[in-house]
């Protein structure tokens, strides 16, 4: 480290040394208190107290330059904490939290606003000692009162996800100006000591004169590495790097957040957005459509390397992307009907003819991770499942779950025959080419809700397969604002959704699957799962003591959800498909567990201005004309969903 860097970090080093001397020795018995700069869910933190930077960042990174990205949809709110409005992307850039995670560990949190943490071995409570240097953007010191205010406000007025996520927090109290304690309910997950550190810290003095539940475009006060600059409602938002950011020399921020500005331009249509990339209207694109990746990246910029195509491997759990059933609807309460409908989706034909063979079929709600169920239940899983045997189908115990497989060439005849057999056994009859629901006596029909027309190419063959069974399914495309509102109010029959997962599942599983969230508007239990056996397994995950118990409980839950036929699984890949203009440098090590638009991209930096100017000058007259034309398109916009879906 050079002298300038050392001087920049000197306040942090001095404070850390004082803290270490005052609090030694640390203890590992429940009678004594553990004190640390970081807390790992299992094992020890990878990075020691005096670490300089995360290893997936670079000491060559320089500040400066601009980054332009694209988003699909629109936005009408800069309040990212309520279930109202369409929020702009990446508002998290303006907020700091007590702790931040590393992107090369399964689940470890390092102090940021919190200088250190104190907790007993059973993690029944945790105290955060705040860093006295931590400041909001108006230079007001971040105090314990702000932390208490943030928690209480998010629990009372924030989106429902906060109430599910932090349900086991018994109380939060300020022990002084810079000291705050979270006390947890008896039996709460040890994970809670980590997740409360992720709490975004809101300025009490700012929100005391404003309506927190109101969703609008007023620029909020934050404390993070960026603040909101220019806002062009529904079209673009620019984040400006905070020049006097309080944590600029903090180890968890070294080599990150290097761009002076980050702009998101919004496009309604993804085809237009791709052409805008090729015309140089923005800089980096994560390609979600296999057809585009295989066929649409051509031209001199690709050939001569000015526009690069790379595939960056990752080890993130890919979760579950799927057609999901709304089981609140009477027509979908029959599990065997849901199973039969799933047989009409021909993944092998779709992958071969629409996806260019790019994807793998998803077999788990925790795909691409050790958390996914495998084979028959292990002895450890059976200890959790056997007490629930009377509530579970026999297939959980004696069958290996696998989505249906076709040969991709015979119009899915084999699976459709299996579907017909199931429907016959359940009393469904075909009358005048329409499948009649025996419980209602009405033809079975439903809408598949979409906001993105790209999914029509996948959904139309699925609908044709359903027609052969006498099922009348229709695509219903709505604008993204209506889509989000209908999703929040559970006003749909079937839709495409992504259930994202982490390497350390915990309290969020309650909001996804627990019966307590089934009838809570805007919860993530979109399916309406209401099953006592599922509730029990969710509780086992939350209360798991150690990594082995967590894996066992997660695998057990996974196989129960799969055998419930709540979804028709889609597909996944284990790498990011990235196209970017050659004006950036990036570290030699990529984050193992992070999204490309999160820590990955935030560790990139701009090449020299002179080099960028040389590249700009190398454009042909035709390409300069193309750029000008693209800038006149003035694309329309609308809000995008939280999760990026992989498309054909």
Image (cartoon, rainbow, N blue to C red):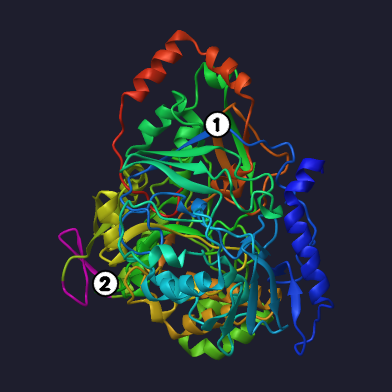
Secondary element at tag 1: strand
Image coordinates of residue 549 in percent, x first then y, are 67, 78
Vertical position of residue 344 compared to residue 340: above or below = above
Range of the magenta residues? 427-441
Image coordinates of residue 74 in percent, x first then y, are 32, 45
Q: Image quadrant for the C terminus?
A: top left
Alpha carbons under labels 2 and 1: distance apart:
44 Å
Vertical position of residue 219 compared to residue 298: above or below = below
Is residue 434 located in the magenta-colored stretch of the structure? Answer: yes
Instruction: Check whether the beta carbons of the residues at disc 2 and disc 1 lie within 8 A of each other.
Output: no
Of residues 462 and 364, the one drawn nearer to the viewer in this rendering: 364
Give the prevailing secondary structure in the magenta stretch. Answer: loop
* Comes first in the chain, label 2 or label 1: 2
Secondary element at tag 2: loop
Q: How many marks?
A: 2
Image coordinates of residue 392 in percent, x first then y, are 48, 83
**Which of the 4 quarters of the picture holds residue 101?**
bottom right
Of residues 5 and 360, the one drawn nearer to the viewer in this rendering: 5
Image mark for residue 205: none
604 horizontally vs 77: left or right: right
Is residue 156 located in the magenta-colored stretch of the structure? Answer: no
Q: Residue at position x 82%, y 44% from top?
A: 1
* Residue of label 2: 329
Vertical position of residue 20 compared to residue 12: above or below = below
* Residue of label 1: 580
Of residues 416 and 359, the one drawn nearer to the viewer in this rendering: 359
Of residues 312 and 194, the one drawn nearer to the viewer in this rendering: 194
403 horizontally vs 77: left or right: right
Image coordinates of residue 175 in percent, x first then y, are 60, 81
């Amino acid at each position: 480290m050079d002298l300038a860097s050392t001087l920049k970090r000197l306040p942090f080093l001095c404070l850390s040394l004082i803290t270490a001397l005052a609090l030694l020795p640390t203890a590992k018995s429940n009678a004594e208190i553990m004190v640390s700069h970081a807390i790992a869910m299992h094992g020890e933190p990878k990075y020691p107290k005096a670490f300089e930077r995360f290893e997936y960042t670079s000491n060559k990174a320089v500040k400066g330059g601009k980054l332009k990205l694209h988003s699909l949809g629109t936005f009408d709110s800069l309040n990212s904490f309520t279930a109202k409005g369409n929020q702009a992307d990446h508002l998290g850039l303006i907020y700091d939290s007590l702790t931040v995670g590393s992107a090369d560990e399964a689940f470890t949190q390092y102090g940021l606003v919190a200088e250190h943490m104190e907790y007993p071995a059973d993690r029944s409570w945790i105290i955060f000692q705040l860093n006295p240097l931590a400041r909001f953007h108006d230079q007001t010191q971040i105090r314990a009162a702000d932390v208490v205010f943030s928690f209480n406000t998010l629990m009372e007025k924030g989106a429902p996800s906060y109430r599910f996520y932090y349900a086991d927090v018994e109380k939060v109290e300020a022990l002084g100006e810079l000291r705050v304690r979270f006390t947890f309910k008896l039996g709460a997950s040890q994970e809670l000591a980590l997740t409360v550190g992720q709490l975004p810290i809101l300025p009490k003095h700012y929100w005391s004169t404003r309506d927190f539940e109101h969703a609008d475009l007023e620029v909020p006060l934050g404390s993070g590495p960026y603040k909101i600059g220019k806002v062009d409602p529904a079209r673009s938002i620019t984040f400006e790097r905070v020049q006097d950011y309080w944590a600029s020399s903090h180890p968890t921020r070294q080599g990150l957040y290097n761009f002076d500005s980050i702009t998101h331009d919004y496009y309604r249509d993804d085809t237009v957005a791709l052409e805008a990339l090729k015309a140089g209207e923005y800089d980096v694109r994560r390609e979600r459509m296999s057809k585009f990746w295989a066929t649409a990246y051509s031209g001199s910029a690709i050939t001569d390397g000015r526009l690069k195509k790379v595939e960056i491997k990752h080890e993130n759990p890919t979760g579950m992307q799927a057609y999901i059933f709304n089981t609140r609807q009477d027509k979908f309460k029959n599990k065997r009907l849901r199973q039969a409908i799933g047989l009409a989706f021909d993944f092998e034909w779709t992958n071969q003819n629409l996806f260019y063979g790019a994807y793998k079929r998803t077999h788990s709600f925790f795909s691409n991770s050790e958390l996914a169920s495998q084979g028959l239940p292990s002895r450890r899983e059976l200890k959790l499942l056997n007490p629930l045997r009377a509530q579970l189908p026999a297939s959980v115990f004696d069958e290996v779950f696998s989505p249906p497989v076709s040969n991709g060439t015979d119009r899915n005849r084999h699976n459709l025959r299996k579907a017909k057999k199931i429907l016959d056994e359940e009393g469904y009859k075909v009358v005048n080419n329409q499948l009649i629901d025996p419980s209602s006596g009405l033809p079975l029909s439903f809408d598949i809700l979409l906001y993105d027309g790209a999914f029509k190419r996948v959904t139309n063959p699925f609908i044709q397969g359903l027609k052969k069974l006498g099922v009348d399914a229709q695509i219903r495309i709505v604008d993204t604002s209506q889509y989000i509102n209908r999703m929040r109010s559970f006003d749909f029959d079937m839709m495409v959704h992504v259930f994202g997962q982490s390497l350390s599942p915990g309290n969020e599983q309650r909001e996804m699957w627990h019966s307590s969230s089934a009838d809570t508007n805007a919860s993530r239990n979109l399916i309406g799962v209401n099953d006592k056996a599922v509730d029990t397994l969710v509780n086992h995950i939350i209360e798991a003591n150690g990594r082995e118990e967590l894996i066992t409980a997660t695998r057990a839950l996974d196989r129960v959800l799969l055998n419930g036929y709540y979804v028709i699984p889609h597909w996944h890949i284990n790498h990011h498909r990235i196209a970017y203009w050659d004006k950036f440098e990036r570290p030699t090590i990529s984050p193992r567990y992070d999204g490309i638009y999160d820590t990955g991209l935030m560790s990139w930096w701009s090449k020299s201005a002179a080099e960028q100017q040389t590249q700009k000058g190398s454009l042909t007259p035709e390409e300069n004309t193309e750029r000008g034309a693209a800038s006149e398109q003035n694309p329309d916009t609308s809000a995008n969903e939280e999760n990026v879906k992989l498309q054909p």
